[in-house]
Image (cartoon, rainbow, N blue to C red):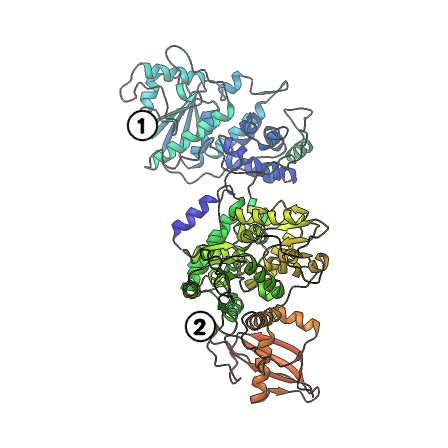
């Protein structure tokens, strides 16, 4: 996978984008984490967070006016979270960490003025190892002292806060030098080459929030000093002036030093003054390192918020009013912090059990998948994660930017298969089941038994493609459905019983996908290029992606245009309608289904996650094949969405929902019902893997014999074997994916070659066979009537030397594995 593919996907996932409060803050204080830590009582950690991003937090934490309040999403519900209150409580209750400056760089910087922007610039530059001298007139503090600091309800921020800030400045080796006044000549001298009285300042910062500095700056620009320039406007990005080594901040950006007609008019803002100092320090540090001051500055200062947060279900919570706004208590701060809604996106994770299971979000998962592909030797720890995605598209449907984790995992699977790094065990059984469905003794294609309808010579010829799973689960319903289509569609309707090839596509096997699709296309051509009626939504998606040019119609669209079948009935209680995930983009098909239900008079519950935002049952993407537990989680999440019985129009959806204990019907149970009433049909067990395969065989034989009058076929000797399997063992065999056919193959081999072991005490035999990459072991006892009682069966992908059948071809990942067989 190209790194550009990863970066493009990462850009779609916005979970790591800062919340609205942080985006608005000029310093990018992580107010969301600050609120969380304070609400959890972790005040010390909250102070560490402040110290990391807020310069001189002992001072600025008491002065911040809270520009974040303008964008707080909680404010759209009731009132914004009072972040300044949290900052003041945190600062009052804790002490700052002692800053650790970097090693000295030998570079010198002059800072003019001792206002908040100057102190901030000095602190930031001192932390980076530069030698900083602050030139000031009178006591340090600038406008802080003129305004009596900041007033909160009659209280003022006092000397202790400034003293704490000076301690931090001393810790990063900032020196202070008092001057009588600031003049234009001082600025020229500061920019002069090194001399005995001048260390050679690489840059000068003018803190214009200190009044004398602002006046001197205006004088310098008005005097048009050589090399300094006349521009009074600082660059908005870098705060650089016309002179390449002069930077200025602390006042309005459009008139940073005022003009001849008067001073700047911007209202004072402590947080903006500090932000200017920090921005200028970043520019100066770049300059001293020989880097352009404009490099990598795009995300500094207030930026648009890209994080989506759904606030539709946020309950109101009244704001906390502290007894003393200047000195709020920790209890008041914790109560206010608890109002924070912890803005995040996570729209996909909230709805998808797969994404939720791995405790992250798509951007994080994409990196793990990419790293998994990049491994040349060693463990690929994300294999199961990659194969557990159902590729259903729900994440893309709910993501504000359409990030599709399923498509990303699908590409990863294809690349792993191509590089021979995909463990074959992940999808082996699903592909084997597809191979069984498409075998010559199962799949078939026949034209309408009556031929072309002579009364409708211009009508299209039709070919009904029920898919491999519908006849495996509902063979009688499928038969009645086919008869209904033949009765009402002019032109004749043939029958094409075949697997579409979706399992091959889901598993990432492109060559196999192309082979199956090519075979279908050739069969369609040989049949005269009819319109294909698709009963399965997954088949429809596969045909549209891999078999373009073949005219297809969804079964439900056809049925909506025909009269209701005789005998169709409704359930009395409302049914919760489950849309298959493969119909996510099939608006017409979803509408047709609802139209059919309306004709039936069937009361329906529309699920909140339905239609284009429907959940997946876990069959898609072979998720349940690669990770049965995760497959069950998909179905359970859907089952928990409603108290009503579910109604599906995909047979695998119905059976998987029923397998987790949820009463579920298929739409054909209403349109072409059997002897059961709807309530009984909703409780019908889902057939197991062996029953499905047997049902496909019986469906073929029955339809060919009864519809096309072909000779009836009898069971082979192996098919006629009678097995007695206890119910608990039958469930275990399902979990182990051991078919009755696999057991019978082992028994037939044992009858011919003899069992490997016989337990003399119990009389049971143990036999083994490796017909493919999987070896099967069966413990059994043969009865006098020729039937077999099965006591246990298991399988593995190891090669056991000396065991018959163990020479079967095996992938490279299975070579070299051997165990010694010991039994009884």
**Circle 2 is placed at which residue position?**
812
The answer to whether residue 821 of the structure is visible from this angle is no
Q: Is residue 101 left or right of residue 697?
A: left
The C terminus: image quadrant: bottom right
What residue is at 61 percent from the left and 75 percent from the top?
740
For this orientation, the residue located farthest to the top is 261
Residue indicated by mark 1: 244
User: For the residue labelled by badge 2, is the local secondary structure a helix, a strand or a loop?
Assistant: helix
Q: Nearer the viewer, residue 168 or 817?
A: 817
Mark 2 residue crowding within 10 angstroms, few (<14) / some (14–19) / many (20+): few
User: x, y (%) of residue 56?
Assistant: 52, 31
Please tell me how many numbered marks the rendered image carries: 2
Q: Is residue 639 left or right of residue 185?
A: right
Above-or-below relation of 475 to 662: below
In terms of sequence position, does the residue under pointer 1 or pointer 2 come before the other? 1
Report the quarter where the N terminus lies. Answer: bottom left
Decide if residue 172 is on the left or right side of residue 188: right
The outermost residue toward the left is: 226
Numbered mark located on residue 410 in the image = none
Residue 551, horizontal then vertical, whole percent? 44, 55
Which residue is at a point 29% across and 16% down the rendered structure image? 224
Q: Secondary structure at mark 1?
A: loop
In the image, 598 versus 438, the foreground residue is: 598
Q: For residue 823, which quarter of the picture?
A: bottom right
Please say whether residue 12 is visible from this viewpoint: yes
Q: How far, Cα to Cα, is label 1 from label 2?
A: 64 Å
Horizontal and vertical percent position of residue 748: 58, 84
Camera-side residue of 602 and 417: 602
Which residue is located at x 53 percent, y 38 percent? Answer: 308
The part of the image, by quadrant, that contains residue 535 is bottom right
């Amino acid at each position: 996978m190209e790194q550009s593919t990863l970066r493009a996907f990462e850009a779609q996932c916005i979970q790591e984008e800062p919340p609205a409060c942080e985006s608005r803050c000029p310093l990018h204080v992580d107010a969301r984490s600050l609120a969380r830590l304070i609400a959890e009582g972790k005040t010390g950690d909250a102070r560490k967070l402040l110290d990391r991003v807020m310069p001189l937090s002992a001072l600025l934490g008491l002065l911040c006016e809270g520009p974040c309040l303008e964008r707080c999403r909680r404010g759209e519900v009731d009132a914004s979270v009072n972040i300044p209150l949290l900052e003041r409580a945190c600062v009052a209750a804790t002490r700052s960490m002692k800053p650790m400056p970097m090693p000295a760089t030998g570079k010198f910087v002059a800072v003019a003025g001792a206002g908040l922007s100057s102190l901030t610039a000095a602190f930031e530059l001192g932390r980076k190892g530069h030698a900083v001298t602050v030139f000031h007139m009178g006591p340090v503090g600038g406008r802080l002292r003129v305004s009596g600091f900041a007033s909160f309800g009659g209280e003022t921020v006092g000397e202790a806060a400034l003293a704490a800030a000076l301690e931090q400045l001393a810790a990063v080796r900032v020196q202070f030098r008092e001057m009588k006044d600031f003049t234009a000549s001082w600025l020229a001298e500061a920019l002069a080459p090194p001399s005995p009285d001048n260390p050679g300042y690489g840059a000068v910062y003018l803190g214009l929030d200190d009044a004398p500095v602002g006046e001197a700056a205006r004088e310098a620009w008005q005097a048009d000093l050589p090399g300094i320039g006349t521009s009074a406007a600082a660059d908005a990005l870098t705060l650089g002036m016309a002179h390449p080594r002069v930077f200025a901040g602390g006042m309005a950006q459009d008139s940073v030093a005022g003009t001849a007609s008067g001073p700047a008019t911007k209202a004072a803002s402590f947080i903006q003054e500090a932000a200017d100092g920090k921005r200028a320090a970043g520019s100066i540090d770049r300059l001293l390192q020989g880097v352009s001051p404009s490099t990598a500055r795009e995300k500094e200062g207030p930026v648009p918020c890209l994080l989506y947060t759904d606030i539709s279900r946020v309950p109101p919570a009244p704001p906390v009013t502290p007894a003393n706004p200047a000195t709020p208590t920790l209890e008041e701060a914790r109560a206010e912090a608890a109002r924070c809604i912890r803005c995040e996106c996570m729209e996909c994770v909230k709805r998808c059990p797969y994404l939720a299971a791995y405790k992250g979000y798509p951007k994080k998962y994409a990196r793990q998948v990419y790293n998994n592909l990049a491994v040349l030797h060693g463990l690929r720890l994300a294999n199961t994660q990659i194969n557990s995605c159902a590729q259903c598209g729900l994440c893309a449907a709910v993501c504000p930017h359409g990030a599709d984790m399923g498509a990303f995992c699908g590409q990863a699977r294809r690349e792993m298969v191509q590089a021979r790094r995909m463990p074959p065990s992940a999808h082996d059984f699903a592909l084997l089941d597809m191979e069984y469905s498409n075998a010559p003794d199962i799949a078939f294609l026949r034209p309408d038994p009556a031929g072309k309808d002579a009364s409708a010579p211009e009508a299209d010829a039709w070919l009904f493609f029920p898919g491999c799973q519908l006849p495996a689960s509902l063979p009688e319903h499928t038969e009645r459905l086919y008869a209904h289509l033949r009765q009402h569609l002019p032109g004749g309707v043939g029958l094409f019983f075949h697997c579409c090839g979706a399992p091959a596509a889901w598993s990432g096997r492109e060559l196999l996908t192309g082979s199956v699709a090519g075979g279908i296309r050739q069969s369609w051509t040989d049949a005269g290029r009819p319109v294909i009626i698709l009963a399965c939504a997954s088949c429809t998606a596969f045909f549209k992606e891999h078999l373009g040019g073949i005219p297809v119609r969804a079964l439900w669209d056809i049925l909506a245009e025909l009269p209701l079948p005789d005998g169709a009935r409704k359930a009395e209680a409302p049914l919760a309608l489950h849309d298959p995930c493969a119909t996510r983009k099939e608006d017409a098909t979803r509408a047709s289904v609802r139209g059919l239900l309306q004709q039936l008079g069937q009361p329906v519950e529309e699920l909140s996650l339905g239609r284009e935002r429907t959940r997946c049952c876990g069959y898609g993407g072979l998720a349940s094949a690669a990770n049965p537990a995760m497959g069950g989680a998909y179905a359970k999440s859907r089952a928990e969405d409603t108290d009503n019985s579910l109604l599906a129009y995909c047979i695998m959806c119905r059976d998987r929902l029923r397998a987790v204990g949820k009463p579920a019907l298929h739409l054909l149970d209403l349109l072409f019902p059997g002897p059961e009433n709807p309530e009984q049909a909703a409780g019908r067990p889902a057939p197991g893997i062996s029953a499905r395969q047997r049902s496909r065989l019986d469906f073929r034989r029955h339809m060919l014999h009864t519809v096309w009058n072909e000779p009836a076929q009898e069971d082979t000797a192996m098919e006629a074997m009678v097995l007695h399997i206890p119910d608990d063992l039958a469930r275990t065999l399902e979990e182990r994916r051991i078919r009755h056919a696999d057991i019978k193959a082992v028994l037939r081999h044992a009858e011919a070659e003899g069992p490997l072991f016989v337990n003399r005490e119990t009389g049971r035999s143990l036999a083994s066979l490796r017909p493919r990459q999987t070896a099967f072991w069966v413990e059994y006892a043969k009865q006098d009537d020729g039937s077999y009682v099965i006591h246990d069966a298991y399988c593995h992908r190891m090669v056991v030397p000396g065991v018959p059948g163990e020479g079967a071809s095996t992938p490279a990942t299975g070579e070299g594995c051997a165990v010694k067989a010991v039994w009884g």
